[in-house]
Image (cartoon, grey):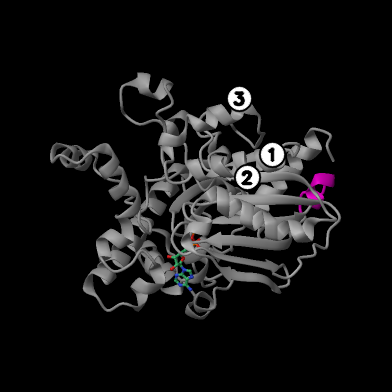
């Protein structure tokens, strides 16, 4: 293991604990904390462990790409998220010796109805977030494990929860409702929306690269392993394809997306338990379930299996349909933005989605620009401009954490 030196005097740690990985990023305290909202977050180091409990592999590198750790571990040595976090922290702490973090920002998937922005974590917040676990069973437990591990290891350190739901908190009631008896809405059974950290970052980037478009009606397509769309009006979220949970909307790598609820009744009536249905909807559906080949878009595009092709066709069809739906919410469309693993890197998927949108929106892509993942991939005569903007959820967490430090007088 090589010693890791961070360049900045004061740093913020960003922790993103996923279903089988823990990522820890080290950021110089963003200038935004001193009032310059346009500055981009500066990453100084990044460590992550993947394959927790299966085939754990630790990697850590500096922002310039220099690799400082790359090791595999026996399964039993990194059996859970707690062990994974301790390991990543150990690696990073070697280099953080002279630069103790001023705060840790955590990605927390579900903030429920209570949090419209990031929040400092205390016992009451933690208890509240615990109660939301059933609404995000794949992500929330890992997010909370990381928070508890930090509390134990560094009890004095300020921890901030940054929510995937918070950016959508201003949605009109029509965008939040599901047509169940109204009492359920009052109990919190409503459409929240997710990927908010990504959308907040993209809204901010759009203001930097195309301020005219950023003021308008924009649909952002976050297409990664998880996938959703967000309707932005003047940089604010007005609707999203995800709902109460991160299952709704588009088909994803392993998640089903929108379903006829009658299909769930049928499954239950066939004798499947709630836990079995949950496992199927989160882990065995989507691209993986349809294709029977893989959840990974690259593998599907490379496959000749007819069902791989069918899965990609369905994915593009559904994405285009939902873009049309959000354009209806917005009353028109001034720009379409693609982001995340597939959205930012896959020309054929973008092309297929946009083919469906040619008739309704007059969208035409520039094949060369699309092939190069250029920032603007539509032709000049396209009625709606189409952009590709890589997202940075961890950078957004660093910015939000710095904002809280500034607002509470800690910076
Ligand atoms: P996560 O939601 O886990 O953060 P990502 O945003 O990294 O996921 O997206 C992962 C998805 O992006 C995978 O389906 C992967 O195949 C896809 N992807 C990444 N690069 C490419 C590429 N060059 N072409 C097609 N798909 C890609």
Q: Quadrant of residue 87?
A: bottom right
Which residue in the protein does label 3 denote? 124
Mark-to-mark CA distance, 1 and 2 = 7 Å
Magenta span contains residue 32: yes
Q: Earlier in the sequence, mark 1 or mark 2?
A: 2
Mark-to-mark CA distance, 3 and 1 = 13 Å
The residue located at (44%, 51%) in the rendering is 228
The residue located at (85%, 41%) in the rendering is 411
* Residue 320: percent from left, percent from top: 37, 58
Q: In the image as oriented, which residue stretches furthest toward the left?
A: 270
* Residue 395: percent from left, percent from top: 67, 54
| Labelled pair 1, 2 in contact (Cβ < 8 Å) | yes
Which residue in the protein does label 1 denote? 159
Left or right of 331 in this view: 395: right
Instruction: Pick the residue in front: 79 or 289.
Output: 79
Does the magenta stretch mainly form a helix, a strand or a loop? loop
Left or right of 74 in this view: 44: right
Name the element at disc 2: strand
Instruction: Pick the residue in front: 371 or 304.
Output: 304
| Labelled pair 2, 3 in contact (Cβ < 8 Å) | no
Highlighted range, magenta: 29-38
Q: Quadrant of residue 128?
A: top right
Mark-to-mark CA distance, 2 and 3 = 16 Å
Q: Earlier in the sequence, mark 3 or mark 1?
A: 3
Residue 106 - label:
2
Assess disc 2: are there few (<14), some (14-19) or many (≥20) residues with their C-alpha within 10 Å of its C-alpha.
Answer: many
Magenta span contains residue 262: no
């Amino acid at each position: 293991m090589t010693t890791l030196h961070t360049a900045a005097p004061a740093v913020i740690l960003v922790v993103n604990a996923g279903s089988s990985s823990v990522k820890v990023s080290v950021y110089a305290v963003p200038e935004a904390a001193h009032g310059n909202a346009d500055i981009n977050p500066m990453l100084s180091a990044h460590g992550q462990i993947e394959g927790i409990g299966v085939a754990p592999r630790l990697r850590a590198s500096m922002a310039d790409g220099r690799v400082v750790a790359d090791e595999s571990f026996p399964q039993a040595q990194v059996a859970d998220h707690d062990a994974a976090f301790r390991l990543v922290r150990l690696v990073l702490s070697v280099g953080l010796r002279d630069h103790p973090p001023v705060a840790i920002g955590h990605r927390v998937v579900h903030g429920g109805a209570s949090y419209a922005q990031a929040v400092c974590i205390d016992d009451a917040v933690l208890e509240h977030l615990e109660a939301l676990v059933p609404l995000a069973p794949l992500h929330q437990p890992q997010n909370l494990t990381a928070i508890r591990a930090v509390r134990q290891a560094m009890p004095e350190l300020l921890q901030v929860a940054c929510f995937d739901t918070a950016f959508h908190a201003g949605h009109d009631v029509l965008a939040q409702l599901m047509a169940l008896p109204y009492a359920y809405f009052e109990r919190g059974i409503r459409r929240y929306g997710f990927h908010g950290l990504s959308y907040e970052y993209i809204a901010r980037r759009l203001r930097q690269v195309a301020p005219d478009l950023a003021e308008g009606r924009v649909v952002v397509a976050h297409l990664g392993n998880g996938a959703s769309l967000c309707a932005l009006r003047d940089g604010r979220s007005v609707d999203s394809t995800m709902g109460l949970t991160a299952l709704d909307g588009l088909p994803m790598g392993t998640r089903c997306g929108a379903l006829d609820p009658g299909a769930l009744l049928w499954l239950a009536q066939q004798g499947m338990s709630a836990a079995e249905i949950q496992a199927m909807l989160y882990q065995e559906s989507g691209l993986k379930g349809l294709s029977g080949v893989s959840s990974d878009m690259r593998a599907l595009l490379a496959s000749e299996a007819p069902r791989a092709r069918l899965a990609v066709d369905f994915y593009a069809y559904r994405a285009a349909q939902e873009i049309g739906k959000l354009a209806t919410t917005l009353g028109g469309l001034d720009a379409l933005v693609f982001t995340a693993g597939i959205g930012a890197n896959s020309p054929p998927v973008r092309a297929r989605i946009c083919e469906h949108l040619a008739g309704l929106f007059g969208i035409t892509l520039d094949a060369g620009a699309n092939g190069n993942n250029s920032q603007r991939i539509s032709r000049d005569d396209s009625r709606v401009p189409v952009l590709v903007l890589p997202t940075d959820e961890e950078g957004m967490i660093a910015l939000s954490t710095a904002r809280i430090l500034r607002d509470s007088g800690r910076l």
